[in-house]
Image: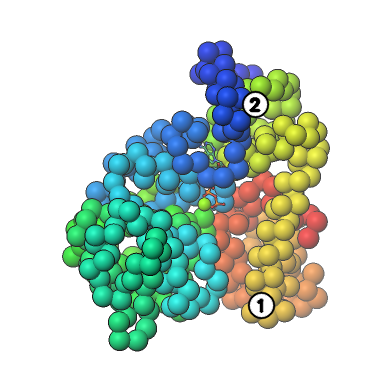
Amino acid sequence: MKGSLRPGSSTLTESFYFWGRSILLGQKLLFDERPKTERRDLFDRERELEELVNNLHRPLVVVTGVRRIGKTSTLMVALRESGLPFLVVDARKLRDNYSLGDLYALLSQALSSSLDRLKDVLSRVQGVSIMGNYVELSWKGKRYVSLGDLFDHLNEKRIIIAVDEAQRLRGPHSGEIKNAMAHAYDYDRNLTFVLTGSEVGLLHEFLGTEDEGSPLYSRYYHEVRLERFSREQSFQFLERGFSEAGMKVEESVIEEMVEFFDGIPGWLTVAGNHYLSRRDLGEVKEMSVRLALNELRNLIESKARISEVTGRRYREVLKCVGEGANSWSKLERCVSEREGVALSSSVLSNVISQLEGMSVISGYQFLDPVYREAVKRL
Ligand SMILES: Nc1ncnc2c1ncn2[C@@H]1O[C@H](COP(=O)(O)OP(=O)(O)OP(=O)(O)O)[C@@H](O)[C@H]1O
Ligand SMILES: [Mg+2]
């Protein structure tokens, strides 16, 4: 379908505008590797932005999609576009077995960043101290503020509470968090929670809206799913990024990038950015594979913390999927051969469902094209 890759909407005037602006401001714009926060720097996502903004009146909205697909960017731009006060909790910073102190420290950071909009509300809450431009929350002792109390006070204003990578909230305090969210869902009509998650299955598991034991059982939420760019969008994205930087890149190079990075905007951004300085596609691919390899190694290491055997099993399953074991029986055979012993079905099934929950694989395939390459080097 290479013939359909010709860009459609990127006009000459548009290219000159972005090129001029990037030179004037000394910015990289589209290839800036940080999450985008401004509408003008976000490529497309018109429909998803509109869908997100239009659903902010609901108590709970969820934004899902594989890693690097643009969740944080879409969230940040939508929050700005909504014109509503918001705070953003970056749950990615939480370690696996986070303490209540860790959780409150994260909330403190989020509240501090939005202090100018929330000072009047926060100054009336017991257990909250405002020290200059930092908000301190007491999480134990007599002047402790519960999450439920905090939400009730924030409810004095219309506020969006966004939690980025909310599946990280799973763990020892998830019950407490969900109880407070369920209370807010029912009573705090001014609050909207927006949760994002790249480990989609784990995020759904955290929410547990279909699990009778979960405090959020049967609560409705609207889900905005971010999908990868089409080939044409990927082509336009790269072309616009290069044109902003004033660089003319051959169509064949752009096409190869489109092919390799399979519509994932985060990879296209990193690749575009590196190509600007290296001008060597082989090197750009190598760099991204190394990045993905590092992420796979971290995943295995985190499992190896449970036990060495567990870590090894994840590695073997990943390798086997990479080698094309695309069915239960093929995977079972491949892993048994590698391990030298037959694995019990329940162990294998657990590893597969965990990897699916983390959105690493789906239907015995890698969701990320660069992971597919990286796994060969594990
Ligand atoms: N629509 C877009 N337009 C411009 N840049 C984008 C777009 N979507 C994503 N990006 C870029 O891709 C990278 C990943 O985006 P972002 O961090 O928003 O994705 P994410 O889904 O939150 O990733 P992660 O799963 O790693 O948290 C960033 O460099 C961001 O600037
Ligand atoms: Mg993100």
Using the image as rendered, state which of residue 61 and residue 23 is in the foreground: 23
Crowdedness of circle 2 by 10 Å Cα count: few (<14), some, many (20+)? many
Q: Which mark is residue 274?
A: none
* Residue ID at (64%, 63%): 328
Mark 2: secondary structure: loop
Quarter of the picture holding the C terminus: bottom right
Decide if residue 24 is in sight here: yes
* Residue ID at (45%, 70%): 105
Q: In the picture shown, does residue 56 fall above or below 144?
A: above
What residue did someone put label 1 on? 305
Q: Is the CB of the residue bearing disc 1 within 8 angstroms of ligand 1? A: no
Please state if 94 lies on the left or on the right of 136 as rendered: right
x and y, in percent, of residue 38 in the image: 45, 37
Using the image as rendered, state which of residue 330 and residue 110 is in the foreground: 110
Q: Quadrant of residue 147?
A: bottom left
Please state if 60 lies on the left or on the right of 317 as rendered: left
What residue did someone put label 2 on? 245
> Which amino acid type is marked by label 1?
Arg
x and y, in percent, of residue 272 in the image: 67, 34
Mark 1: secondary structure: loop
Crowdedness of circle 1 by 10 Å Cα count: few (<14), some, many (20+)? few
Q: Residue furthest bottom?
A: 141
x and y, in percent, of residue 146 in the image: 30, 76
Decide if residue 163 is in sight here: no
x and y, in percent, of residue 174 in the image: 41, 74
Q: Residue furthest front?
A: 132
Q: CA distance from mark 2 to mark 1?
A: 44 Å
